[in-house]
Image: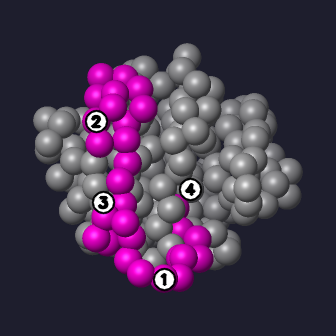
Amino acid sequence: MRARTPPKGPAGKHGGLGQLRIIGGQWRSRRFTFPDGPGLRPTPDRVRETLFNWLAPYIEGAHVLDPFAGSGALLLEALSRGAASGLACDLNPASVASLRGHLATLRCTTGDVRHADALQLLAGQPLRQFDVVLLDPPFHQNLLQSACQLLETQDWLAPDAWIYTESESAPSSLGLPGNWRLHREKHTGQVHYALWQRG
């Protein structure tokens, strides 16, 4: 959902719409708008570029899960770069409708977007095991640790899955599952981002 404290002041520069650009892959440089929401903060281009450089050897053919989709930037980037399928969900119906529209525009039939609460989804029966999971939940709501525990206990993850996290705290302080190995980490401003591999 990419949520943080929303900026004060007038509506966004684009009349209440944010903008995103797909950085790489078959849809490189395609641009889309998405509806602003309270505190919606798409993963910045430079962070997405770093993340997908990290994932470059693993993303093609991967089954990708994005439980806090927000603008959909991470899901679209993964599919553009050759992911075999993508499942996303978000609580904001406008975000869900927008992302479904982008997939239709791209004639992409491998992306599925659901209007759902991420933790409720993850607490249920897994639809499959996923190779790559992209976790950027709203900050300051204690969602990340719960989501990670559900991924493990409910068997959503492939044996050697890769998990990306964005958080307001350093990765070492998150208390994530003990069988996850921290592969790479960086931070920019107040955002810490990291890539983990399930062991």
Residue 185 in the figure: left or right of residue 152 = right
Q: Horizontal placement of 171 versus 82: left or right?
A: right
The answer to whether 140 appears left or right of 2 in the picture is: right
Above or below, 23 against 149 in this view is above
How dense is the environment of label 3, judged by Cα within 10 Å: few (below 14), some, or many (20 and up)? many
Q: CA distance from mark 1 to mark 2?
A: 29 Å
Residue picked out by circle 3: 34
Residue on which disc 1 sits: 9
How crowded is the residue under tag 4: few (<14 C-alpha within 10 Å), some, or many (20+)?
A: many
Residue found 76% across the figure and 39% down from its top: 185
For marks 1 and 2, the one nearer the N-term is 1
Q: Is residue 23 above or below residue 147?
A: above
Crowd around label 2: few <14 · some 14–19 · many ≥20 (10 Å): few
Q: Amino acid at mark 3?
A: Phe
Circle 4 sits on which residue? Answer: 136
Nearest to N terminus: mark 4 or mark 1: 1
Q: Which of the marked residues, 1 or 3, is nearer the chain's N terminus?
A: 1
Q: Earlier in the sequence, mark 3 or mark 4?
A: 3
Nearer the observer: mark 1 or 2; the answer is: 1
Residue in the foreground of this view, choosing between 144 and 44: 44
Residue tagged 2: 30
For numbered disc 1, what is the local secondary structure? loop
- Residue at image location 37% in from the left, 48% down from the top: 20
In primary-sequence order, the first of circles 4 and 2 is: 2
Evaluate whether residue 147 shows in this view. Answer: yes
Across and down, in percent, residue 21 comes to 37, 41
